[in-house]
Image (cartoon, rainbow, N blue to C red):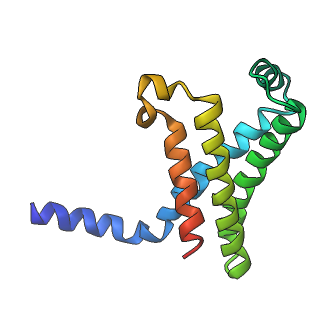
Amino acid sequence: MRKLNNLLESIAKPLIPITPWLLRLGLGTSFILHGIGKFPLPPEKMVTWFESMGYMQPEIVTSLVALGEVGAGVGIILGGLINNHVGNLITRLSGGAVGVIMLGAIFIAHSDWLVTKKLFMSEQIFLFLIGLYFAIKGNK
């Protein structure tokens, strides 16, 4: 067992510095693609759904969600490329934006988890947690 552990450690050790980038690129890309998928603005399907739920100003809200998703995704990636306090701030703000957007998605758009109790079988909770990770950790 010890030999296997040492072998795996020797393989993994040089890769440790890039591990935050695995999360950063996955989250950033996911958010950029989700947001771009809602263009052109306002996203008509989303507007119709928000109208059916009785939300006020659905064109504005849905457009802000789409722009927020793209902006947060770009910010998560861009923040990691800027190696100073500005990059750290961009990462933290973008992670916070991801968290807020995902809370909205969980409680508004994907609230069926309240009935089915399958929140942890849903990717929304993991996107929220990764956003929270970057909001707390920043680039450190």
Q: Up-down: is 20 above or below 110?
A: below
User: 133 or 32: nearer the eye?
Assistant: 133
**Would residue 100 appear left or right of 12 to someone viewing this image?**
right
How many numbered badges does the structure rendering display?
0
Q: Up-down: is 73 above or below 137?
A: above
Quadrant housing the C terminus: bottom right
Quadrant housing the N terminus: bottom left
Q: Residue furthest bottom?
A: 84
> Residue 139's spot in the image, x, y percent?
59, 73
Q: Is residue 28 visible?
A: no
Q: In which quarter of the image is residue 50?
A: top right
**Would residue 126 appear left or right of 30 to someone viewing this image?**
left
User: 106 or 130: nearer the eye?
Assistant: 106
> Residue 39's spot in the image, x, y percent?
85, 33
The residue under the point 69% across, 81% down is 85
The residue under the point 85% across, 23% down is 44
The residue under the point 66% across, 50% down is 100
